[in-house]
Image (cartoon, rainbow, N blue to C red):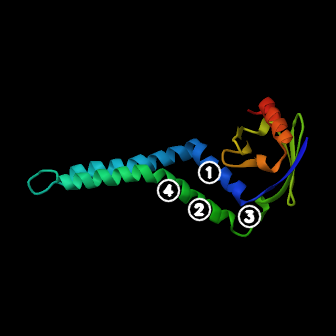
Amino acid sequence: MTINFDIDMDDMMSFQRHYVNTNPAMVKAKRMITYLFPLFILVFGFVGFYDRYNRLDIAFIIFLIVISVLWVVFMPKLFIRLTLNRTKKILSKPGNEIMFGTFEMRFTNTGFDVKTAAANSSILWSTIPKADETRDYFYLYLSQASAYIIPKRKISNADVESLHALFTTYLL
């Protein structure tokens, strides 16, 4: 089975969004940033800011709680947005055009071949450590942070079904 499709910036950013939301290290970093800062603010706010009568200032406590709640509510989305913006900036730099364009993938029982304008490669199923399927994409990981992206909207429904069956057999 052979498929042809184009990869553009939207496809690459969808993979990055998927990676940020599913990679254990990224999820852990997002959790740490989200919860440790407010905890730090609250602990040091309570411990370090007594008024001159050794009482906590209730207005200051309320301020710290509001800041902490706002941080927990908004930081996860901000973390993702900042990460994606940084990634898009990197991908937009000269020299990264090789990651975009037309891909031809030929699938066999032993693996698949990939042809682009810049390179050809053959990949064995046994060398793919992970595969993910989302509503819009198939991701065939080459490493923890690198994957072949197959956008479902750019191939036929029959090819999507065939790939799902193939990947279920060999990877998923």
Which residue is at a point 72% across and 54% down the rendered structure image?
11
Contact check, label 4 and label 3, Cβ < 8 Å: no
Q: Quadrant of the N terminus?
A: top right
Can you tell which mark lies on residue 85? Answer: 2
| Residue 125 in which image quadrant | top right
Q: CA distance from mark 2 to mark 3?
A: 16 Å
* Among the 4 quarters of the image, the one containing residue 158: top right
Left or right of 44: which side holds 71?
A: right
Q: Amino acid at mark 2?
A: Asn
Quadrant showing the C terminus: top right
Residues marked 4 and 2 touching at CB (< 8 Å): no
- Sequence-first tag of 4 and 2: 4
CB under 8 Å between discs 4 and 1: no
Whichever of labels 1 and 3 marks the residue nearer the N terminus, that label is 1
Q: Which mark is drawn over residue 96? A: 3
Does dot 1 land on a helix, a strand or a loop? helix
